[in-house]
Image: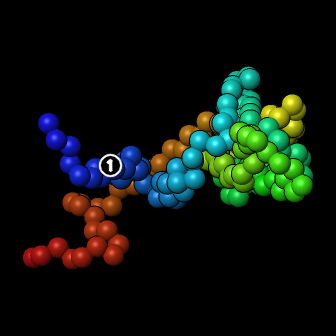
């Protein structure tokens, strides 16, 4: 069985049940484009409301790393200074390239801290406990028969 030359991605957010989530789809697309696998990372749940992201950043110092939160996007950038001047490498297997790793955060998530330890960058995140919001919508009566909607075209008659 032959596969088609291209596969169109069916959007989860294209469902009529998800209204107003266009920005989430755009954010996910943006994050997916810069996910090349470097540096490797772990995400672990350390309690009910806490997560820890750990990135393997061997060779990067604190001055080489930058962490920013842009809206709901956590962005970690690394750029090492070239320290190879005057050195002759017979083999260079330790990556010294710049990187950018982005994570989409749920509404209200906070980065509580970050630290560098033995070539691992750790970021501690707190997930807020969602409040249960219940709002009762009153149903009003409007005379006999169907009520015309404001801005709706007039019914043929």
* Image mark count: 1
The picture quadrant where one finds residue 51 is top right
Residue 9 appears in the picture as rendered = yes
- In the rendering, at what x and y percent does residue 86 appear? 89, 55
Q: Going 16% across and 41% down the picture, which residue do you hit?
A: 2
Residue 110 appears in the picture as rendered = no
- In the rendering, at what x and y percent does residue 5 appear? 23, 52
Q: Going 50% across and 58% down the picture, which residue do you hit?
A: 26
Which is more toward the observer, 66 or 38? 38
Is 48 situated left or right of 83 in this image? left
Q: How is the image coloured?
A: rainbow
Q: Quadrant of the C terminus?
A: bottom left
- In the rendering, at what x and y percent does residue 97 appear? 72, 51
Q: Going 68% across and 41% down the picture, which residue do you hit?
A: 39
- In the rendering, at what x and y percent does residue 84 appear? 84, 53
Outermost residue, top direction? 47
Q: Going 52% across and 54% down the picture, which residue do you hit?
A: 33
Which is more toward the observer, 127 or 139? 127
At mark 1, the secondary structure is: loop
Q: Judge whether 19 appears above or below 12 on screen.
A: below
Outermost residue, left direction? 157
**Residue linked to disc 1:** 10
Q: Judge whether 70 appears above or below 88 on screen.
A: below
Q: Quadrant of the N terminus?
A: top left
**Mark 1 Cα-neighbour bin, 10 Å: few <14, some 14–19, many ≥20:** few
């Amino acid at each position: 069985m032959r596969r088609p030359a291209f596969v169109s991605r069916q959007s989860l957010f294209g469902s009529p049940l998800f209204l107003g989530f266009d920005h989430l789809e755009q954010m996910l697309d943006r994050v997916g484009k810069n996910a090349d696998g470097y540096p490797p990372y772990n995400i672990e749940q350390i309690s009910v409301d806490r997560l820890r992201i750990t990135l393997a950043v061997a060779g990067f110092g604190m001055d080489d790393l930058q962490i920013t939160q842009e809206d709901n996007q956590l962005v970690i950038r690394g750029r090492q200074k070239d320290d190879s001047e005057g050195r002759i490498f017979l083999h260079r297997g330790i990556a010294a390239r710049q990187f950018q790793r982005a994570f989409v955060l749920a509404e209200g998530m906070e980065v509580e801290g970050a630290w560098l330890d033995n070539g691992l960058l750790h970021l501690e995140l707190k997930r807020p406990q969602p409040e249960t919001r219940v709002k009762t919508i009153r149903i009003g009566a409007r005379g006999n028969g169907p009520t015309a909607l404001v801005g709706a075209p007039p019914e043929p008659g």
